[in-house]
Image (cartoon, rainbow, N blue to C red):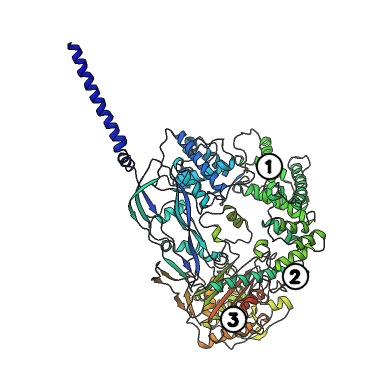
Amino acid sequence: MFFKSRLVVATVVMILLFSILLWRIFSLQIVNGKEYQDNYTFKIVKERTLNSTRGNIYDRNGNLLAYNELAYSITIEDNGTYSSTKAKNAAINAEIAQVVTALEENGDSIVNDFKILLDDNGNYSYNIEESGATWKRFLADVFGEASFESMQEDESDIISRNKLDFKPTEATAAQVMQYLAGSNRYAIGTEYDDAMAYKITVVRFSMAQNAYQKYIATTIATNVSEESVAYISEHAAELQGVEVLEDTIRKYNDSEYFSSIIGYTGKISTDEYNKLSETDDSYTLNDVVGKLGIEQYMDSDLKGEKGHEKLYVDYLGKAVKVIEHEEPQAGNDVYLSIDKDLQIAVYKLLEQEIAGIVYSNIDNPGSDINIPITDVYFALINNNVIDFSHFSEENASPTEREVQQIFASRQNAVIEQIRTELTGSAPTPFASMTEEYQDYFTYIIKNMLHDNNILLKKNIDTSDEVYLQWQNGAIGPQEYLNHAIAKGWIDITKFSVSEKYSDSTEIYDALCDYILNDISTDSDFTKIIYEYLIQTDAITGRQLCLILFDQNILAFDEDDIAGLSGGTIAPASFIKEKIQNLEITPAQLALDPCAGSCVITDTKTGEVLALVSYPGYDGNRLANTVDSDYFNSLQQNNARPLYNYATQQRTAPGSTFKMVSATAGLAEHVISTTEQIQDLGVYKNVSNEPRCWIYRSFHGSHGLINVSEALRDSCNYFFYEVGYRLSTNNYAMSYNNDAAENGIEKIQKYASLYGLNETTGIEIEESKPQVADSFPVMAAIGQSNNNYSTIQLARYVTAVANSGTVYNYTLLNKVTDSDGNTLKQYEPEIRNTVDVLSDSDWDAIHTGIRMVVENTKEFDGFPIEAAGKTGTAQEDLKRPNHALFVGYAPYDNPEISIATRIANGYTSHNAAEVSKKILAYYFKVEDADSLLNGQAENINATSNGVND
């Protein structure tokens, strides 16, 4: 009975406890379940940075040049929990692959600022200059080192730690990819093809750059489609750390005309982050910053101030509730000194002029430097206008397939002949080879072996007998390369990593294999083969012209296609017409000339109204997500559109320098405004006996002339004499080394007065000028080693126009906040005044350059009185001269100055011609539509003479 009662009690207790447990479970899960779940979720707190909106950029008149558009970005954050590194890599790689696949299906692409490209043939290559600063920084980031220098110091440890079979400081693109995809880093499995593995690596590497910054997400893609937004949203529950964020993208109006000034934006690099963070700790490695131009220089004004928010997130990292929020502040707006309409007009007029020069010199037996039509055809291949890699694609046109067959046959023959020369028993001495095969082997030795540091220049003994025989063409490449191996001039690690070779024969065989394999895929070597096929008419102009339509380079035209196919339209006439109509531009062909620049300044204020560099590029395709194919095409374009010809290109000023020499002569009183000097044609006071241009061209003389007339006639003899008198203190001393140094010091003094000894002060990249430091007699006519950019000549001629006020330039007008309130005003500052000349001296100089324009046929009938000076700079006897003109208008009351340079533009008259048209546009003396007609101008400009 006792035991029975105890059992009842125990049962009752158990039932009671079980009832309490059930009630507690019910309370936790049903009654208060939501509250407890919320409380648990809310314990995961995340802070998030809110990017500000970048400020706009306007021209001087308020025309919008750079702005932002609302867009959506996809980001990823490494915030998951994983059981192991292996599991983490597998999960993240799979997630990235899933997102990339979805993006591409919707026509979107990932952000790719990775420094390695993957081509269609599965080959990896750097898209930056190897051995350059960016390349070194990239390799340091790849191997987790603070700097390239620390990599060099710790190289053996890096090799051991990562089990590398290569030197990380010399890593090829393929080796970097192999390392990053390997088990020590991202463990990208073989289930992914090369293209997907590459894209996963791009994203993983970008994520790794943010790894040490808490709560910093990595942007996978920007400006994505609504379909991609929908996909990410629908799959949010399975995509760890992936989010859709509202964002902005940078846009540029009329970008081609302003790219050289404004630049573009892009994702911050490690070096940029390190530098900018020294003074501003708000930067992160996921920021977008100005990369070039005003975007870069004014980044701190344009970027605004970031906001932030604190929020609760769920286990997938998705936002649940915002608990703290601070709005970002929009960036300030920047106004330039540039006039938009003038900038565009000058660009178009330059392009028309350059096109006209090219057009007029094609197949022209009267041209001083003729452009063969075959060079024009080859330019379509050489400058990548035509994509010859498409010739072998499945969807290639019949004409493309036809050309590919011709090329493939010739390529096989060329490679076999090269194999014979490298391995055969009777190799041909270089001098006995045809010009074609000399070109092939020159490329192999110089571009493939030297430039890739396989044949080490630093190791070569240039006094070596076999080396000298090679230089003289007495032996062939087989003997030379075998000798180079024996002498230790070859770095075998560059072409053979995994195998060890025991003797020089095996090493030579491996080198030959490397060469033969490489030339079969090397695009530059391929172009040499195409060049000779085009020269021999094995590939015809007709075929190449038709391919322009096949590849949509030219708009479809049924009549033109029929005419070319049927032979009723000659390909030479066809291509010239397209050049004349600017359907094919000088920038596409990259023949001489293909580039030019012009700077226009307000002579009264020093404001830069136009700064034009031709050719330009589309900053919209570089900002935000870099179009890597487009960027690569810009880098490979021989016309160098990324180069600012107005601020970076330096050439001799030619006769445009003679106003400096006139100033020096008058100020030092070695000449007067009225003194006349007899031009004897050949100047015999110095040992090189230079000749006046009129004597060299016509065995003539300018006779007895004063300084104004010497400027008018650009008389070299007169200014030789000025340089000599400056050196000898007006014949007070003999002309010797001391005298030459004395003359140079005086020329430098007066060049410096015009600001030619230093950069102009503009906010974008500018080359440092070079005032001559030797040969004062030659320096006085703008030769010796005088070298200036167009903008430096612009500042100089502005000072001539306003009688001596030299400005420090700026491209900025003002900065305002987002509400339009002016925060800072910019204006050119007076650097100095040229106060060494009397009014009569200035009159003499102004009169002289006024007479230049009066005697320049290009200005005949021009209704605005102008003054100016032409200049021709001879740099390479095999290429056309550089054409220059500097001037101002109106003559009596100057309003603007102009400095124009056409690189390799044949004659200064071409620069004068386009300058006249620019002045006509500015002063509205000709109809704008007739000036900007999209047609090549001045199509009779064929002289390459120096007559100034």
Q: Amino acid at mark 2?
A: Ser
Nearer-the-camera pick, 27 or 470: 27
Instruction: Tell me, for residue 367, which label it has, or none.
Output: 2
Badge 1 is on which residue?
A: 517
Identify whether 812 is placed above or below 388: below
Residue 169 visible, this angle: no
Q: Earlier in the sequence, mark 3 or mark 2?
A: 2
Label 2 packing within 10 angstroms: few (<14), some (14-19), many (20+): some
Image spot of residue 554 (x, y percent)? 69, 61
The answer to whether marks 3 and 1 mark residues whose Cβ atoms lie closer than 8 Å is: no
Nearer-the-camera pick, 756 or 572: 572
Q: Amino acid at mark 3?
A: Lys
Quarter of the image where the C terminus is located: bottom right
Q: Amino acid at mark 1?
A: Asn
Name the residue at 42% across, 55% down: 275
The residues tagged by marks 2 and 1 sit, at their Cα atoms, a distance apart of 42 Å
Label 3 packing within 10 angstroms: few (<14), some (14-19), many (20+): few
Q: Earlier in the sequence, mark 3 or mark 1?
A: 1
Where disc 1 sits, the SS reads helix
